[in-house]
Image (tube, grey):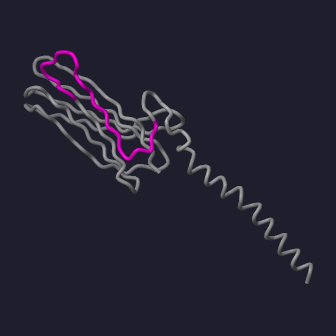
């Protein structure tokens, strides 16, 4: 009887010794990205915010491009919304909005998805799209804006990074 109890304790101890490192490692993998919160990677602060927005403002005298903005939002369930606008001072022959969704992999940003929109004879171009993404990464958005009416004016802006669990 004593041998059975000692054998069960030994099996239990062995099982625990095998499971504890596995479970501990799983917790470490989940938290890996969160230990980077607050760091700056290529100009973007890594955050746990639900959304981030960046605006390109034209401070010099401009006759065409007023401003451009890009926004990235975590909608939950590993779905993000990427939206942007190009806003002009006047009706332009061509208005463009180019949006890039980037993911941080191995310490640097890589393109995940891109979209390019063009509108003619308008002063405003806005678009928004929802995208399913992989969890466990930081994402950011880049917007590029241009307006053409004889000449062309352009600019770009980049959001901070948001953690998608």
Q: Nearer the viewer, residue 144 or 115?
A: 144
Q: How many marks?
A: 0
Q: Nearer the viewer, residue 112 or 158?
A: 158
Query: Image height check: is 108 above or below 150?
Result: below
Residue drawn at point x = 81 percent, y = 70 percent:
11
Q: Nearer the viewer, residue 52 or 82?
A: 52
Residue drawn at point x = 17 percent, y = 19 percent:
152
Query: Image height check: is 106 above or below 149?
Result: below
- Which quadrant would the N terminus be assigned to in this image? bottom right
Q: Residue furthest bottom?
A: 1
Residue 100 lies in quadrant? top left
| Spot occupied by residue 64 in the image (x, y as percentages of width and height) | 13, 22
Query: Image height check: is 44 above or below 60?
Result: below
| Spot occupied by residue 88 in the image (x, y as percentages of width and height) | 14, 28
Instruction: Judge from the rendering whether residue 101 lies leftward or rightward of residue 124; answer left or right.
Output: right
Q: Residue furthest right?
A: 2
Q: Is residue 13 magenta?
A: no
| Spot occupied by residue 75 in the image (x, y as percentages of width and height) | 34, 52
Magenta stretch: give its range. 46-67
| Spot occupied by residue 89 in the image (x, y as percentages of width and height) | 11, 26
Q: Is residue 56 magenta?
A: yes
Q: Nearer the viewer, residue 160 or 83?
A: 160
Residue drawn at point x = 83 percent, y = 72 percent:
9
Residue 114 lies in quadrant? top left
Instruction: Judge from the rendering whether residue 30 lies leftward or rightward of residue 21; answer left or right.
Output: left
């Amino acid at each position: 009887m004593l041998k059975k109890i000692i054998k069960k304790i030994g099996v239990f101890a062995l099982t625990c010794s095998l499971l504890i490192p596995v479970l501990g490692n799983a917790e470490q993998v989940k938290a890996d990205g969160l230990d980077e919160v607050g760091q700056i990677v290529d100009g973007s602060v890594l955050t746990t915010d639900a959304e981030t927005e960046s605006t390109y403002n034209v401070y010099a005298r401009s006759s065409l491009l007023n401003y451009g903005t890009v926004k990235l939002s975590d909608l939950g369930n590993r779905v993000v919304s990427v939206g942007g606008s190009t806003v002009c001072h006047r009706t332009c022959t061509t208005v463009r909005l180019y949006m890039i969704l980037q993911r941080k992999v191995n310490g640097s940003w890589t393109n995940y998805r891109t979209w390019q929109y063009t509108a003619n004879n308008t002063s405003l171009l806005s678009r928004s799209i929802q995208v399913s993404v992989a969890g466990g990464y930081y994402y950011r958005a880049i917007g590029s804006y241009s307006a053409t009416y004889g000449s062309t004016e352009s600019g770009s802006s980049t959001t901070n990074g948001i953690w998608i669990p």
